[in-house]
């Protein structure tokens, strides 16, 4: 799929949360040695199973379970750069449900990926449900927000609402990559999508099956949107002036 994207002119590819193992917490819990990739203390991963992803000459963001030398297990977004180096660039900060909390330690920092002239904030699935997570990325000057995800069947309404909202909230592009298929209760709902800075969908995958969704991110459109929809510039900077009004 990454090769298809690159051959179609893509300069960056994004794949879903825990894509390398599949999003299935019981399977990860049963076989951590087989499903977690080992990172060194700097987050660098050297695993021959990922060699095919090193050869596409475009950066790839892809979800994986990662184990660190200090014993931490994380749900991470790996970045495979154009030279083939693989780094656990971002660890999911908002863990969703007891299954994830039993498996993983939450990340403690955000991350911004620079590709050419573009800056992209990294998030994973449930992170995007929190407006402040996308806003922190916007405050770091990003132009887009890359979100590998694992939404289960039945959550399609929220899946299609959150990431369009994060795009409009922050006048930024959003790339949302969700897996499809599997067995209940871990059947995933697909619907990967790319949103423009006003929250309009530029391309969406089906709820079933695999596909490669392509879109062009336009800096002129981004600048035009931010000049007309100036929420980032106009929002109140100080929260100390808020007061409650009590009516008796």
Image (spheres, rainbow, N blue to C red):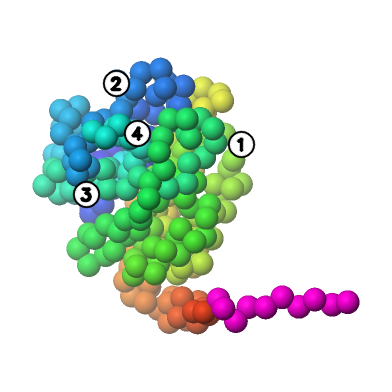
Q: State the residue at coordinates (67%, 78%).
A: 243
Q: State the residue at coordinates (55%, 76%).
A: 239
From the viewer's side, name the closer residue of 248 and 107: 248
> Could you tell which of marks 4 and 1 lies nearer the N-terminus?
4
Q: Residue furthest top?
A: 30
Residue 59 badge: 3
Q: Nearer the viewer, mark 3 or mark 4?
A: 4
Image: magenta residue range: 239-248
Residue 199 falls left or right of residue 110: right
Q: Position of residue 24 (x, y in %)?
A: 45, 26
Q: Position of residue 225 (x, y in %)?
A: 44, 75
> Could you tell which of marks 3 and 4 lies nearer the N-terminus?
3
> Could you tell which of marks 4 and 2 lies nearer the N-terminus?
2
Q: Is residue 98 magenta?
A: no
Q: Is residue 216 visible?
A: no
Q: Residue furthest right?
A: 248
Residue 33 badge: 2
Mark 4–mark 2 Cα distance, whole angstroms, equals 11 Å
Q: Position of residue 213 (x, y in %)?
A: 37, 47
Q: Is residue 169 above or below residue 7?
A: below
> Could you tell which of marks 1 and 2 lies nearer the N-terminus?
2
Residue 154 badge: 1
Q: Position of residue 156 (x, y in %)?
A: 58, 43
């Amino acid at each position: 799929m990454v090769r298809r994207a690159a051959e179609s002119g893509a300069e960056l590819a994004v794949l879903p949360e825990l894509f390398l193992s599949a999003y299935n917490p019981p399977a990860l819990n049963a076989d951590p040695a087989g499903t977690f990739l080992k990172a060194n203390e700097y987050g660098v991963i050297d695993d021959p199973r990922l060699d095919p992803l090193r050869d596409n000459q475009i950066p790839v963001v892809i979800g994986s379970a990662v184990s660190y030398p200090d014993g931490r297990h994380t749900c991470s977004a790996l970045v495979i750069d154009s030279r083939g180096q693989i780094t656990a660039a971002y660890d999911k900060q908002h863990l969703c449900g007891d299954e994830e909390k039993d498996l993983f330690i939450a990340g403690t920092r955000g991350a911004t990926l620079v590709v050419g002239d573009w800056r992209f904030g990294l998030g994973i699935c449930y992170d995007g449900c929190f407006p402040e997570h996308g806003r922190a990325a916007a405050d770091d000057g990003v132009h887009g927000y890359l979100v590998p995800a694992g939404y289960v069947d039945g959550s399609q309404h929220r899946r299609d609402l959150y990431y369009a909202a994060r795009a409009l909230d922050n006048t930024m592009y959003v790339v949302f990559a969700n897996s499809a298929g599997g067995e209940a209760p871990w059947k995933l709902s697909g619907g990967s999508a790319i949103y423009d800075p006003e929250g309009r969908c530029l391309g969406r995958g089906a709820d079933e099956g695999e596909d490669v969704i392509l879109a062009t991110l336009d800096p002129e459109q981004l600048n035009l949107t931010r000049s007309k929809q100036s929420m980032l510039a106009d929002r109140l900077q100080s929260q100390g002036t808020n007061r409650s009004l009590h009516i008796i």
